[in-house]
Image (tube, rainbow, N blue to C red):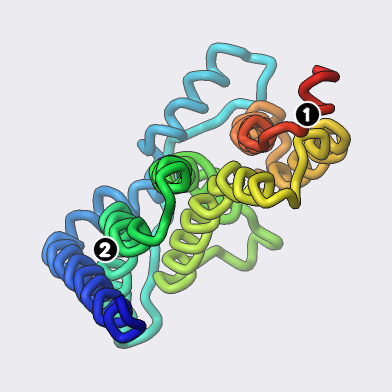
Amino acid sequence: MTFWGHLDVLRRVLFKIAAVIIMFAVVFFIFMPTIFDKVILAPCRGDFWLYEFFHNVTSAFPYLPQFDTDGFEVHLINIQLASQLFIHMSSSFWLAIVFSFPFILYFIWGFVKPALYDHEIRGVRRAFMFGNLMFFIGLAVGYFLVFPITLRFLAEYQLSELVPNQVSLDSYMNTFLSMIFIMGVVFEMPLLAWALGAIGLLRRDFFKRYRKHAIVILLIIAAIITPTSDPFTLMIVFLPLYMLYEASAFFVKPMRNETLNE
């Protein structure tokens, strides 16, 4: 196939991707009021499942700081005239990107597959599937764990009682989207480690050599995400990050001498 032939195929792939995104965006735009109330704003209420889980756990262990869910509610305000319309549109678009992600990977896979050898096809197919799975797991961890903990702390933190917290809709959505998408990207770390190991830029002994350093750094990151005083909440965030580190080491193919040492 000529260069222009490849370009024409790529154009059709991009058209299919755009069509899928637009289709999902229209569907989410129609149902966004319900999704907004029951999903996006769910962490603003004390009956969110994570808050109730923490409450039940701390109630069972009296020596832990008690996690109270009664009376917690974050009231958002809108200070920009067109914010609600723009957020309605942008939220529909970002949700469309997320849920069309498997289709996007499928179309991209169909474009690059003819250029690969048989052994490369097997490896890249697994990488696409694994990357897709880890991205959604990261989104779930961001939504169900990291963002609610961060919201709970920041919404209740006050420098002075004379300054009440009034959270704007724009601020809430910026934090919501950024934290969840960041977690989705962070959970691609094992895939990145596998790719770097495949091209020889990363070795498994790197993870063993710097494991203690990684634990300290991950604890600091977890403490920044959950700046609370109880160790239970800290460990809830730290453990997924540490598991990612160990998973990254697992997916890096060891060198021959490393295998013999193990």
Q: Residue at x 34, y 54 (%)?
A: 41
Amino acid type, label 2: Ala
Q: Position of residue 238 (x, y in %)?
A: 67, 35
Crowdedness of circle 2 by 10 Å Cα count: few (<14), some, many (20+)?
Answer: many
Amino acid type, label 1: Arg
* Furthest residue toward front: 1
Residue 256, which numbered label?
A: 1
Q: Position of residue 61 (x, y in %)?
A: 61, 13
Pointer 2 or 1: first along the chain: 2
Q: Residue at x 33, y 59 (%)?
A: 114
Residue 218 quadrant: top right
Residue 19 quadrant: bottom left
Local secondary structure at mark 2: helix
Q: In the picture, which quadrant includes the C terminus?
A: top right
Left or right of residue 152: residue 114: left
Local secondary structure at mark 1: helix
Q: Nearer the viewer, mark 2 or mark 1?
A: 1
Residue 98 or 250: which is nearer the viewer?
250
Left or right of residue 59: residue 64: right
- To which residue does mark 2 refer? 96
Crowdedness of circle 1 by 10 Å Cα count: few (<14), some, many (20+)?
Answer: few
Residue 152, which numbered label?
A: none
- Compared to 182, does 246 lie above or below? above
Q: Residue at x 48, y 58 (%)?
A: 181
Q: Position of residue 143 (x, y in %)?
A: 43, 46
Q: In the picture, which quadrant includes the N terminus?
A: bottom left
Left or right of residue 68: residue 42: left
Is any part of residue 98 visible from this angle? Answer: no
Q: Residue at x 44, y 71 (%)?
A: 168
- Compared to 97, does 260 lie above or below? above
